[in-house]
Image: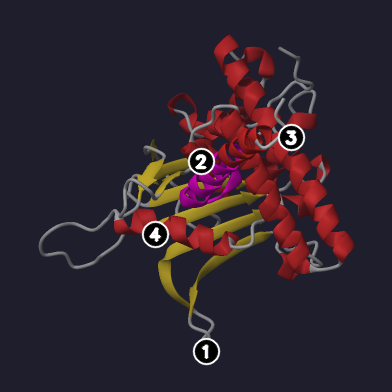
Amino acid sequence: MEEIAGRYINPYTDYGFKLLFGTEPNKDITLELVNALLQGKEVIKTLTLLPPEQLGDLKDKYAHMFKVYCENEQREKIIIEMQKADQQWFKDRSVYYSSFPIRSQAIKGNWNYKLKAVYTIGILDFVFDEDKDDKEYYHHVVKLMDVNTKEVFYDKLTYIYLEMPKFQKTEDELETMADKWLYALKNLPRLLERPAALQERIFKKFFDVAEIGNLSKEEYAKYFESEKVYYDNDGAIRTAEAKGIAKGRAEGRAEGRAEANRENARRMKAKGYSVADIADVTGLATEIIESLLLRTSSNKNNKHATSFILYHMGPRH
């Protein structure tokens, strides 16, 4: 196995992110991250990690694996997602996923529809097209609002989106805990040691967990494979975006990204990944992935059938 450059894992990889924030021994790290990002909310005292798989109404088709799914002591649900690339329907997808913890609160019998709050935190390795020119606006807090009064209409559904490419603060400019977490996440793969500005006890644990040299052989193998998928996907998306930009059309970029995701789905299946894992990495719906795989299999069969016909139509001796 090849050696991975750098001292610390890349948190933008699926395995790296789940290791840091989605495992029971490290849920105190997750708690500190959530408290830092839920600015203006009462401090959360405890977090319970929940099974990441959430099923839709059609259980055999609509399953989604959240990166990290948890609840606080008030049983409010929190989804934490690391999104590596923009997708045409990203906002729709984000709202759709938030519906799972909402619907799961329904109870049989006489129910008054009272809900616990649901929070979605999206750590994004891309920027939104509509505000790409505003370099200072990277921390979005989205709620249902009355368009006339400009007041929050419903405060139990919150979406927090962090456009990481816009976060450009240096170590000397870090002021809040949110600043420190964003700095750590963005720069972790390039750091050689824990920055002096991140001296809180939780960051000592964070960097210990993230150190590649501390991974077991099994953990290292899983991380290595996850990092290969990340860079394959990143390279494919960058190439597709470049082609789309060269065409000068927004739809070209969107189609390029979509084709990159479809191609990566085929490649991941060839490497033995499950449909659920492919959906988790590419963001494609499971039914689209299954359709792609069936089409690929059909094409292979047709190719073999054509070769067979051509062979038998050749000259006879």
Quarter of image, res 243: bottom right
The amino acid on which the numbered mark 3 sits, given as a three-letter code, is: Tyr
Quarter of image, res 207: top right
User: Where does label 4 land, which residue?
Assistant: 99
User: Where does label 3 land, which residue?
Assistant: 231
Q: What is the CA distance from the residue labelled 3 to the residue labelled 2? A: 18 Å
User: Where does label 1 land, which residue?
Assistant: 148
- Which span is picked out in magenta? 281-300
Asked if labels 2 and 1 touch by Cβ distance under 8 angstroms, the answer is: no
Question: Sequence-wise, which precedes: disc 3 or disc 1?
Answer: 1
- How crowded is the residue under tag 1: few (<14 C-alpha within 10 Å), some, or many (20+)? few
Question: Sequence-wise, which precedes: disc 4 or disc 2?
Answer: 2
Residue 210 visible, this angle: no
User: Where does label 2 land, which residue?
Assistant: 67
Residue 201 vs 182, above or below: the answer is above
The amino acid on which the numbered mark 4 sits, given as a three-letter code, is: Ser
Q: Residue 191: percent from the left, percent from the top?
A: 79, 28
Residue 313 vs 139, above or below: the answer is above
The amino acid on which the numbered mark 1 sits, given as a three-letter code, is: Asn
Asked if labels 4 and 3 touch by Cβ distance under 8 angstroms, the answer is: no
Residue 311 visible, this angle: yes
In the picture, measured across the screen, residue 53 lies left or right of residue 266, that is left
Question: Sequence-wise, which precedes: disc 3 or disc 4?
Answer: 4
Query: Which mark, residue 204?
Result: none
